[in-house]
């Protein structure tokens, strides 16, 4: 179960998978090109619009994203046949896990026995739960275990297990020496999984946003309107997950009946096969995207040259078409919102709000405790060595998985409730939502810590005695907490706003497709006359739908948060510049295009 043996796929199977990847890229890349064009127009429209002052009060920490490196001895189930063997594991700061036969192999800089990126894995710490999972992989052969071959997992019960499970990859089975070591590894691995999973969601690059939009549109073209966790990971990993889901029914039907072994041995064989398929698909997707990179760079440069001179005209046309289209779809759209969305919007909004509030309150408490600890040491005339050590510990808080777990668990607690509330709308991306909330907590903590240390460094001098230094730090403490309150309030609103769009927009689009898609043909000629891929009638239609939905969301946020900062809500979260039917068309165009990604990280 450790390193990679030779692939169980023959040449014919590998060639078949290559053809599947080529087909996926051939169908997906046109969507990607279109969204790259839309992203260029969006960027230009922002430049044409009024420039808003920076919203953030805290200084931005430049070390994110990263996790703290973690290493130590474990026992791993590896080899052929698999056996529990001592190993030395290292979790890198970029979220990559490596394992060596001995510590010396790592310290000498030797190549690891095996390694894996942690994208898409789940950490299990119950052996019984993991065995149930194995049984579920091949249900037809797991009903009677009396005649099975000896099972290494059953032969040697594990007291502190760490099972890394992946839906399309080989499982990794480890065991720690103590419960304390198991917990430390679990928290470290979960941090690496989150880091690897949210790489695209955290990115502010227009190409990353365009890619996520293209994935969403590609899936909608195949009838998959709901959001889920398929977009966790890098661009190649996301494409791999999309294709693996498409291939899975065929693989089960054609391969499972012919697998040798019984029960859990058969489940391991199935896991090994999936791992080989996943590796082949990932290699093909990575190669395809690398091959597309030069074309993408040239395309972006060409789009900039061709769109910028005509941007004003294109934006005015878009606003006019949006205004006419709004009148056509308003009746069925309002009916859908009243009948489907309005009843559940308050509950989901309140659940999101309480989740983020609890998490950010935990961040503030942790931050305050850290600053207070420094004050006590300073007032107590502690040694400079001890104070420096405490300052270092304070600066490392955002990357301390044990400390930050106090904040992270608040997001986990509401996962089940959010999943139940959002599932009727086709939303199954609660893992992405939880990761997003945890990323938010870490970012705010890191920014607050950075701000405190920099302000403290500016105001403290060698001429100050301990009492004077403590007084200065009290002032810094107050400033940092005030800045944190401002930034956390804005971030909370944007987070809730983005995830409400993620939950409801695909559902509303799916409900309207049968009745409204035909109406788009009336306006297609106007848009096609522009001759630019940056403007499509489907894109304008989606903006109109988003605008109606945003009215509901903003109204609900106003009820939930109160009217005191509603102007900030609209400034921070507005994504519907085409939704002002009564506004002047020129003003509409100058305001800029709406963000195409209805995800939590969308921010102008």
Image (cartoon, rainbow, N blue to C red):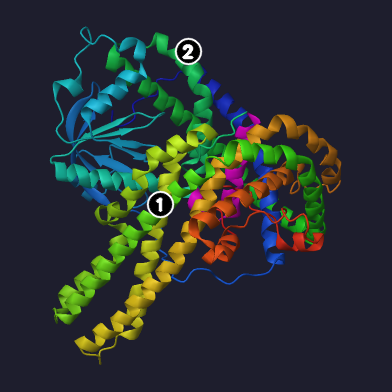
Q: Is residue 353 magenta?
A: no
* Magenta range: 201-222
Residue 260 seen anywhere in this rendered image of the structure: no
User: Contact, CB < 8 Å: mark 1 with mark 2?
Assistant: no
Residue 432 percent location from the top left of the image: 45, 43
Point 76% across, 42% down: residue: 537
On the rendered structure, is 77 left or right of 510? Answer: left
User: Relative to the observer, which residue lies in front, 518 or 534?
Assistant: 518
User: Relative to the observer, which residue lies in front, 73 or 586?
Assistant: 586
Q: Is residue 124 above or below residue 444?
A: above
Which tag is nearer the camera, tag 1 or tag 2?
Answer: 1
On the rendered structure, is 122 left or right of 376? Answer: right
Residue 98 seen anywhere in this rendered image of the structure: yes
Label 1 SS:
helix
Residue 354: numbered disc = 1
Residue 21 percent location from the top left of the image: 57, 29
For disc 1, the neighbor class at 10 Å (few under 14, some 14 to 19, many from 20) is some
Residue highlighted by disc 2: 253
Q: Is residue 404 above or below residue 157?
A: below
Q: Main secondary structure of the magenta part?
A: helix
Point 46% across, 37% down: residue: 421
The C terminus - image quarter: bottom right
Label 2 SS:
helix
Quarter-of-image position of residue 174: top left
User: Relative to the observer, which residue lies in front, 169 or 455?
Assistant: 455
Point 69% across, 40% down: residue: 333
Residue 280 percent location from the top left of the image: 47, 29
Quarter-of-image position of residue 476: bottom left
Point 46% across, 71% down: residue: 57
On the rendered structure, is 292 left or right of 580? Answer: left
Marker count (numbered): 2
Residue 150 percent location from the top left of the image: 19, 14
């Amino acid at each position: 179960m450790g390193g990679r043996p030779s692939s169980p796929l023959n040449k014919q199977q590998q060639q078949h998978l290559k053809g599947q990847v080529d087909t996926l890229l051939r169908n997906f890349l046109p969507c990607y090109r279109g969204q790259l064009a839309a992203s260029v127009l969006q960027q230009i429209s922002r430049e044409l619009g009024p420039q808003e002052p920076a919203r953030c009060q805290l200084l931005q920490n430049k070390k994110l994203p990263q996790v703290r490196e973690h290493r130590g001895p474990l026992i791993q189930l590896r080899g052929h046949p698999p056996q529990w063997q001592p190993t030395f594991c290292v979790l890198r700061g970029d979220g990559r896990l490596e394992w060596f036969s001995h510590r010396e192999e790592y310290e000498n800089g030797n190549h690891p026995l095996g390694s894996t990126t942690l994208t898409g894995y789940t950490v299990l710490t119950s052996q019984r739960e993991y065995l149930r999972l194995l049984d579920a992989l091949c249900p037809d052969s797991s009903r009677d275990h009396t005649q099975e071959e000896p099972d290494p997992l059953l032969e040697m019960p594990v007291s502190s297990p760490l099972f890394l499970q992946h839906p399309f990859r080989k499982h990794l089975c480890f065991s720690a020496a103590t419960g304390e070591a198991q917990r430390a590894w679990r928290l470290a691995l979960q941090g690496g999984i989150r880091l690897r999973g949210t790489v695209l969601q955290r990115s502010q690059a227009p190409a990353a946003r365009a890619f996520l939009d293209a994935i969403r549109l590609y899936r909608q073209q195949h009838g998959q309107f709901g959001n889920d966790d398929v977009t966790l990971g890098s661009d190649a990993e996301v494409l791999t997950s999309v294709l693996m889901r498409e291939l899975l029914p065929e693989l089960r039907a054609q391969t499972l009946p012919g697998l040798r072994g019984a029960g859990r041995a058969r489940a391991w064989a199935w896991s090994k096969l999936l791992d080989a398929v996943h590796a082949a698909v990932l290699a093909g997707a990575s190669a395809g995207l690398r091959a597309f990179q030069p074309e993408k760079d040239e395309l972006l440069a060409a789009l900039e040259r061709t769109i910028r001179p005509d941007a004003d005209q294109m934006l005015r046309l878009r606003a006019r078409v949006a205004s006419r289209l709004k009148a056509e779809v308003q009746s069925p759209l309002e009916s859908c919102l009243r009948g489907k969305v309005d009843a559940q919007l308050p509950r989901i909004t309140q659940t999101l709000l309480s989740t983020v509030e609890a998490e950010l309150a935990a961040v503030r408490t942790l931050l305050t405790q850290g600053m207070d600890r420094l004050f006590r040491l300073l007032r107590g005339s502690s040694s400079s060595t001890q104070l420096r050590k405490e300052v270092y510990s304070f600066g490392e808080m955002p990357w301390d998985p044990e400390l930050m777990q106090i904040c992270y668990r608040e997001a986990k607690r509401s996962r089940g409730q959010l999943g139940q509330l959002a599932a009727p709308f086709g939303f199954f991306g609660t893992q992405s939502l939880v990761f997003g909330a945890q990323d938010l907590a870490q970012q705010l903590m890191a920014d607050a810590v950075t701000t405190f240390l920099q302000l403290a460094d500016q105001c403290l001098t060698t001429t100050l005695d301990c009492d004077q230094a403590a007084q200065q730090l009290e002032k810094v403490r107050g400033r940092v907490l005030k800045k944190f309150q401002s930034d956390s309030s804005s971030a909370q609103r944007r987070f809730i706003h983005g995830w409400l769009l993620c939950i409801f927009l695909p559902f509303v689009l799916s409900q309207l497709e049968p009745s409204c898609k035909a109406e788009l043909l009336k306006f297609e000629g106007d848009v096609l006359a522009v001759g630019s891929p940056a403007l499509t009638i489907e894109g304008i239609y989606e903006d109109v739908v988003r605008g109606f939905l945003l009215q509901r969301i903003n109204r609900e946020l106003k009820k939930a948060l109160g009217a005191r900062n509603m102007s900030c809500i609209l400034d921070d979260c507005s994504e519907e510049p085409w939704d002002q039917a009564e506004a002047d068309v020129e003003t509409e165009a100058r305001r800029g295009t709406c963000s195409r990604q209805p995800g939590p990280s969308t921010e102008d």
